Amino acid sequence: MDISVIGTGYVGLVVGACLSEAGNHVTCADIDEEKIRSLRDGEIPIYEPGLERLIPENREAGRLRFTADPARAVEGAEVIYIAVGTPPDEDGSADLSHVLDVARTIGENLTPDAIVVTKSTVPVGTAPKVRQEIESRTDVPFHVVSNPEFLKEGAAVEDFMKPDRIVLGVESDEVKPRLEELYEPFVRTGNPVIFMDVASAEMTKYAANSMLATRISFMNQVAELCEETGADVSKVREGIGSDPRIGSSFLFAGTGYGGSCFPKDVQALVRKGDEEGVDLSILRATHTQNERQKRVLLRKVRDRYGADLSGRRFGVWGLAFKPGTDDMREAPSKVVIRGLLEAGAEVAVHDPEAMEVARGVFGDSVEYADGPYAAARGADGLLICTEWLPYRRPDWEQLGAAMTEPAVFDGRNLFEPGRMRERGFQYFPIGRPEVRSPRRQEPGPRPGRPAGERAGESAGSAGGE
Ligand SMILES: NC(=O)c1ccc[n+]([C@@H]2O[C@H](COP(=O)([O-])OP(=O)(O)OC[C@H]3O[C@@H](n4cnc5c(N)ncnc54)[C@H](O)[C@@H]3O)[C@@H](O)[C@H]2O)c1
């Protein structure tokens, strides 16, 4: 099929590359001329595993092209994907201006009977607006389909190639056979293609992200209570996650969720509720808890060293909002690093992929270390914000020797508190017992903490890392 994808960001680039790999002729368009220039020069503007093979191979095969002229991309296309951003407006609702701009361009260049597929995450009621914008520019017949995208950055290519499910909101049954043909290569293992009406499809995406975000905020609140009661949230997670009604995914306590989707989608759904007179109070709480959670490591640092951090130095491991990507949009690391700097500390940072992006965020205010141990050199504490694989098995001797004070503030609960004690590290995880006095028996429970904490600590050390 001849396909155009308008918007060549994290979603559009993956969608375009994967559809071309399945044998379609795909033109990816973006108004960001610099991005298109670099793609044409063979550079890939984002880090997403798999694209480095798919893009050059499909370009060479003549199936994948890039243009900075969306109008040209639309001409002659049988299927047109809208994959532009839907950033939050000032009040948190989704800004549809890019989507509707694209709809107008589509209207001016449309081929009869083309399918316009909304991939961008858009609130319920957007498809009729897209239709209206297109109809204001053309008389030719066309179809509008809502096809929310569930890919995860860092595993986006694999998620698109082997989706758990494909959700398609359609205006009529007429278009179904063409969509089935389009997606047939991606559901060979029998994963479902779920057809529904467009409103339900649009709502499905927000409901999915909001549910996942709520699980995270819920576990972060449970973690807070664990800290006060001497329970260990990792044990609680195992205990509840083995219940098939709950399942084990998205139950990790940490420094809060970030990225370009969960924060904005939760808020956009709350605003949609407001518009419709429905108070989505659970999601308000999800968002509030997450904002609070992004500061949890800062609270632990302040408890340990006081509010004034001048003269102190900290290393930060992990800047991307999650492993496998260079995306720092809404990343908890930004809140953590700004908090450290505001308190007067010096900060050295490391991330396997996001260093370039970080330079654009922090400029000269932090030191960019050329490796994890260089970031920890001379540090009073190491803060872990992203659970990249190389951070999970550090060389403890090298790390301890590099730091002025071996103290790890672990926003991703990567290590067992008991093992950290044996290694001689102070250890401050989330919702788990802290280790304040490594390598020696503590005289008793810390002031203000119940005796249960010590019991929890030894229970924690019994498990593997
Ligand atoms: N990033 C994710 O993990 C993810 C997952 C699922 C859904 N989504 C949704 O997909 C959409 C795109 O997200 P993204 O992360 O790819 O965004 P992005 O910011 O990485 O990319 C959007 C691209 O659209 C381009 N653009 C804006 N206006 C345009 C126009 N008028 N014509 C052509 N191009 C235009 C921008 O230049 C940019 O390159 C959003 O609605 C998002 O919520 C994102």
Image (cartoon, rainbow, N blue to C red):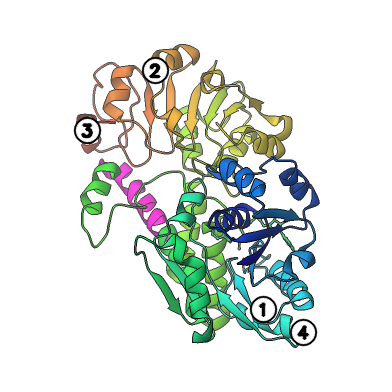
Q: Are marks 2 and 3 in contact (CB under 8 Å)?
A: no
Give the residue at mark 2: 396
Left or right? Give the position of 180 relative to 131.
left
Question: Label 2 amino acid?
Answer: Trp
Query: Closer to us: mark 4 or mark 3?
Result: 4
Residue 129: x and y, percent? Answer: 66, 81
Q: Quadrant of the C terminus?
A: top left
Cα separation, mark 4 vs mark 3, equals: 65 Å
- Where disc 3 sits, the SS reads loop
Query: Amino acid under label 3?
Result: Gly
Compared to residue 365, the image places residue 29 above or below, namely: below
Query: Which quadrant does ligand 1 occupy?
Result: bottom right
**Do tag 4 and tag 1 residues touch (Cβ < 8 Å)?**
no
Residue 268 appears at what percent x and percent y? Answer: 57, 68
Labels 3, 1: front one: 1
Measure the alpha-carbon separation of dots 2 and 4.
65 Å
The numbered disc on residue 463 is 3
Range drawn in magenta: 214-232
Is label 1 or label 2 in front? 1
Residue 259, compared with residue 119, is above or below; it is above
| Residue assigned mark 4 | 138
- Residue under the image location 64 percent in, 65 percent down: 3
| Disc on the earlier residue, 2 or 4 | 4
- Closer to the observer: label 4 or label 1? 4
Q: Position of residue 148 (x, y in %)?
A: 52, 67
Q: Earlier in the sequence, mark 4 or mark 3?
A: 4
Residue on which the image places disc 1 = 130
Q: Earlier in the sequence, mark 1 or mark 2?
A: 1
Mark 1 residue element = helix
Kind of residue at disc 1: Val
Residue name at image x 48 percent, y 66 percent = 183
